Amino acid sequence: MTYDDVLLLPGYSDFAPADIDTTSRLTRELSLRVPLMSAAMDTVTESRMAIAMARQGGIGVLHRNLSIADQAYQVDLVKRTQTGIITNPVTIGPDSTLEELDARAGEYRISGFPVVDAEGRLIGIITNRDLRFTPAAEWASTTVADVMTPMPLITGPAGISREDATLLLRKHKLERLPLLDQDGRLTGLITVKDFVKSEQFPRASKDAQGRLLVGAAVGYFGDAWERATTLIDAGVDVLVADTAHGHVRMLIEMVERLKKDPATRHVQVIGGNVATREGAQAFVDAGADAVKVGVGPGSICTTRVVTGVGVPQVTAVYEASRACRPAGVPVIADGGMKHSGEIAKALVAGADTVMLGSLLAGCEESPGETVLVGGKQYKAYRGMGSLGAMSSRGKKSYSKDRYFQAEIASDDEIVPEGIEGRVAYRGTLAGVAQQLIGGLHQSMFYVGARTVPELQAKGTFTRITQASLQESHPHDVQMAVEAPNYTGR
Ligand code: RVP
């Protein structure tokens, strides 16, 4: 069965909708306040989407159709995103030119840098204010040391509390407060903007140091191990073994190795994708921290048509959960979600979180420009198994081994398992997430479940017919106004 085959029965609710808590387990060791992941696809998740997802309480999984260095750089961008105290701030040296400074500012989307010497000691700070009197024409020949505001500056000790930092920022009307150890070495930075942001995103998914959580996709082929270790060095929290068919010896061995090697085992590892109990069990046995489920449900996916292989998603999630639940390993339902209602259905079927592609591809934060078609705005959305993603048209494709076609050299011999399409532009992720999370809240209230574990325990499916599916959707009227959470079937 799949999502359209079932509905959830309403149940008795003895709490207020405001009491609902959507926190759920992502992996053995990590939880999210919002059980949503953005798909590891090159039209869905790069650093902007990953940052936006983590701020909303979910997590983004950076796609792997790019070089190792580029993907690690994306991880770095997310981990450096400011959420309060920045423990590893981006700095600049005194001998850099203002032109280099400007490039770095654009790259990291920040407007000021602590200036440090070769030993990491703070020697000044440079912000937009210091650049104001130097015309752009002179940027190439002016150094940071020429215009920075030098020490002594107001600084705080490493390990300062939030309260003390707020007092200092307020007292001295500061924008930035560098944190120093006893030897004057920079250990962190606090900016007013980030303090405000961390209040603005109370649900944000963060690591122990207050940095946003981020996931990244890896494969099993060629330099996969190097990719995994480079991503770990860049600070990734979750590695997602990302293939269309995970029940494969080489991939299971990769997960096993990642969970055994002392250099990598501290990172959470998700195995996938599978669609059977046996497939899930193989990853549980390999030590995976979560198992991702979905063979063929994706909106852009043609695997089931091209190969005749797959399992309808509700059944697949249920079957995988029979292996994972007893072992305490969370399940991720990946693909096939068209509306918010499917999130609750997936959780009741046995998932702990869900992964979304098409529902997020239209967001401002997804890669790619908006295009105008017939007066409406769209964004491109393509399968990672589409010809566009797997062929070497334009640039090198790293997507082929997701479909076990890495060794195919000629584009003519590629067997695509996905299509290239587009989805309606939907504005920022904050608005889209608001509808998805709000929809899940409503589901939980209607089922009578205050928490996700309660939803999983209490939720009961009723099987429906084609006629009732028709009744579920708007019918016998013409839609006059577009709803923010309904775009049709
Ligand atoms: P959807 O949310 O239905 O758009 O599905 C997204 C999922 O589809 C991805 O997370 C991935 O598992 C799968 N996918 C990505 N590319 C392809 C393909 O080309 N077949 N499938």
Image (cartoon, rainbow, N blue to C red):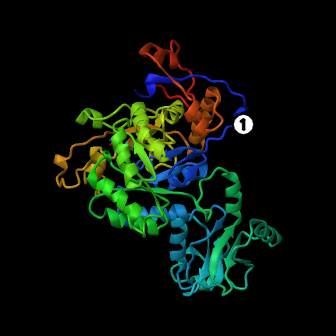
| Number of numbered callouts drawn | 1
As drawn, is 89 to the left or to the right of 354?
right
434 versus 446 height, above or below: below
Looking at the rendered image, the quarter that the N terminus falls into is top left
Q: Position of residue 17 (x, y in %)?
A: 70, 33
As drawn, is 262 to the left or to the right of 278?
right
Tag 1 secondary structure:
helix
As drawn, is 328 to the left or to the right of 219?
right
**Is residue 136 at least partly visible in the picture?**
yes
**Is residue 361 at least partly visible in the picture?**
no
In terms of image quadrants, where is residue 297?
top left
61 versus 226 height, above or below: above
Q: Residue furthest front?
A: 326
- Residue type, numbered disc 1: Ala
Q: Residue furthest right?
A: 171
Q: Position of residue 388 (x, y in %)?
A: 29, 47
Which sits in the foreground, 111 or 408? Answer: 408
Which sits in the foreground, 186 or 237? Answer: 237
> Which quarter of the frame holds ligand 1?
top left
Q: Position of residue 173 (x, y in %)?
A: 79, 70
Task: Give the residue pinned by disc 1.
Answer: 18
Looking at the rendered image, the quarter that the C terminus falls into is top left
Q: Residue at image x 18%, y 53%?
A: 408
Q: Residue at image x 41%, y 47%?
A: 43
9 versus 234 height, above or below: above
Q: Position of residue 452 (x, y in %)?
A: 59, 39
Q: Residue at image x 36%, y 64%?
A: 227
In terms of image quadrants, where is residue 21?
top right
